[in-house]
Image (spheres, rainbow, N blue to C red):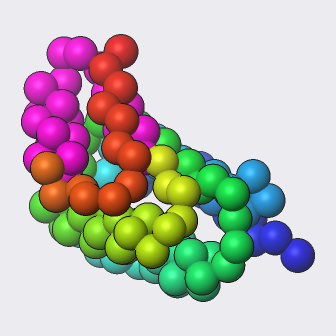
Amino acid sequence: MAFHLEKEKTTSTPYILVDEEKNYMKFEGRCFRENIGEVFKEVDQWLDTYLNTEFDLFTFDNEISYFNSSTTKIIYNMLMKLDKYAGDGKNIVVNWITAEDNEVMIECGEDFMEEIENLKFNLVIN
């Protein structure tokens, strides 16, 4: 049975969708809760298992419009994990989606893009 997780956003946590059947993950909203590791723990554990399976294409859409430094670290670690597996031949696409007036998220996406070596990273500015 394919893993499926959907968490509604709150004032301090993003909407999270993981749909293994569709090889898709999405984060959307704002993320600044102090204990944010707990919010992403289940997703990160699933990712470790999932990336060792066979799939044609995995897509991660990130539409978080604001996050704190704790969240930055978690997202960075996820991106590095995805990049490692892309380097092992997995087809992985990350869409960093942000508004054109959100300079902080644009800059953050550009910074992450510089760290990426293997996966396809799209900076999508609306």
Q: Nearer the viewer, residue 36 or 79?
A: 79
Residue depicted at x 36% and y 35%? 122
Please indicate whether residue 36 sits to the left or right of residue 49 in the image: left
Residue 70 position by quadrant: bottom left
Please indicate whether residue 1 sits to the left or right of residue 115 in the image: right
Please indicate whether residue 102 sits to the left or right of residue 6 in the image: left
Of all residues shown, which one is farthest toward the front? 89
Residue 53, position in %: x, y? 67, 79
Of all residues shown, which one is farthest toward the right? 1
Depicted 81 relative to depicted 9: above or below: below
Residue 91 visible in image = yes
Depicted 61 relative to depicted 13: above or below: above
Residue depicted at x 19% and y 36%? 105
Q: Nearer the viewer, residue 83 or 48?
A: 83
Residue depicted at x 59% and y 55%? 58
Residue 68 visible in image = no
Examine the structure image and report whether residue 97 is included in the region drawn in magenta. yes
Q: Which residues are magenta?
A: 94-113
Residue 95, position in %: x, y? 42, 39
Residue 112, position in %: x, y? 19, 51
Instruction: Give the number of callouts.
Output: 0
Examine the structure image and report whether residue 46 is included in the region drawn in magenta. no
Residue 1, position in %: x, y? 88, 76
- Give the quadrant of the C terminus: top left
Q: Nearer the viewer, residue 62 or 86?
A: 86
Residue depicted at x 18% and y 31%? 106
Residue 63 position by quadrant: top left
